[in-house]
Structures are given as structure tokens and as C-alpha cells.
Image (spheres, helix red, strand yellow):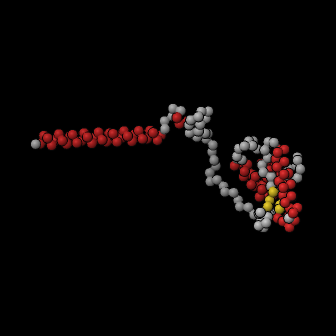
Amino acid sequence: MWLQCGCRVFLIAGPRPRDENSWYRVATQARIHMNGFLEDHQELMPQVVDKLVVENGTIDPNSPAYAVAVLDDDSGWLPERQARLFYKYLTRQLAPFLAFDPLPVHKRPRVVTGEPSTAARERDYPAVKDGRVNKNAQRRKEQRKRRSEARAAARALEQLQMGKTGETE
């Protein structure tokens, strides 16, 4: 569909999982699928830019997949540092075809201070309920106490005023 609309299609291999054979199989299947389509539509061939791996065991050192190396966790997200590196190498590889925008820079470096206090560690409930005081509950308790003291002071003032009015009569 995109080729018929006049778009250019770039075939690029993503980051490599620990099982590189599956990564090569996906690249091969993508190329076979695209070549099968292009056999019937030769006029669309100039719109396809193929940057996939050529064969098992060979990776272009300028490839973004080579720069990122092998992912630690296949099911997890790509860490920001590796995603930025992938984007940097992708811009180099596709510079003859596209102009990329630079990625936004963080205003301050991110400092990892540990897990948040509400994170569930090895239990099924938040850490706040593990004997720690919830700040909202503490604030509400203090507000109730202040309101109660204000009501008690108002009652005492009323009784004091009633006592004075009773003495003057």
C-alpha cells in the first residue's frame, strides 16, 4: 500500500535479541516477502531501500543493530541509552536518503536513587502499607485535630460569654 502511494520503504533490522538465529530468520522472511511483492511490481523497486543483513553471521558495522549490540532482556523495553545509540547510527546509515531531526536532550541528568517508596518489592501490596506512615492520612489526622481544637475553643468561649452575661443580670 505504501509503495503504491509513492512512499519510500526502508528495510532495517532492529536490535538483536540473544537468539540471533531468530533475528536472521525474521530479516530473511522480510526480504523474501518484499521480493515476492516486487516480482509483480517491478516499477516500485526503486522505492525500496534494503538495509537488512545479507546472510547469517554477517552484520554491517555501520548498522544500528550492530551498535546497540545484543539486548539483555528480549521481552523488556530498550533502555534509553541504547535507543539513542540506535537512532544515532540509523541517522548515519540513512543520511543519503533522509534528513533526521536531532533527539531532544534532557535538561538535567537523570539520577537513579532507587525504587520509589510505593513500589511493591517481594509482596503483593505497596511498601507504604508496610508499616510506613501515609503522609495524606497523617495530614488528614492533623486537620481533624485542629478542627476539633477550634470547636472546643469556640464552645469554651461561648460558655465564658454566657457566664459573663449571667453575672451582669
Left or right, residue 53 beside residue 107: right
Tell which of 131 and 37 is nearer to you: 37
Residue 80: where, in percent of width, then height? 69, 49
Q: Look at the image and tell me whether residue 107 can be seen.
A: yes
Residue 113: where, in percent of width, then height? 61, 41
Residue displayed at 33% across by 39% down: 148
Tell which of 34 and 76 is nearer to you: 34
Left or right, residue 157 beside residue 33: left
Residue 66: where, in percent of width, then height? 81, 49
On the rendered image, what quadrant is the C terminus found in?
Answer: top left
Q: Look at the image and tell me whether residue 46 can be seen.
A: no
Which residue appears farthest toward the left when viewing the image? 169
Residue displayed at 61% across by 39% down: 114
Residue 147: where, in percent of width, then height? 34, 42
On the rendered image, what quadrant is the N terminus found in?
Answer: bottom right
Which residue appears farthest toward the front when viewing the image? 40
| Residue 50, quarter of picture | bottom right
Residue displayed at 56% across by 39% down: 118
| Residue 48, quarter of picture | bottom right
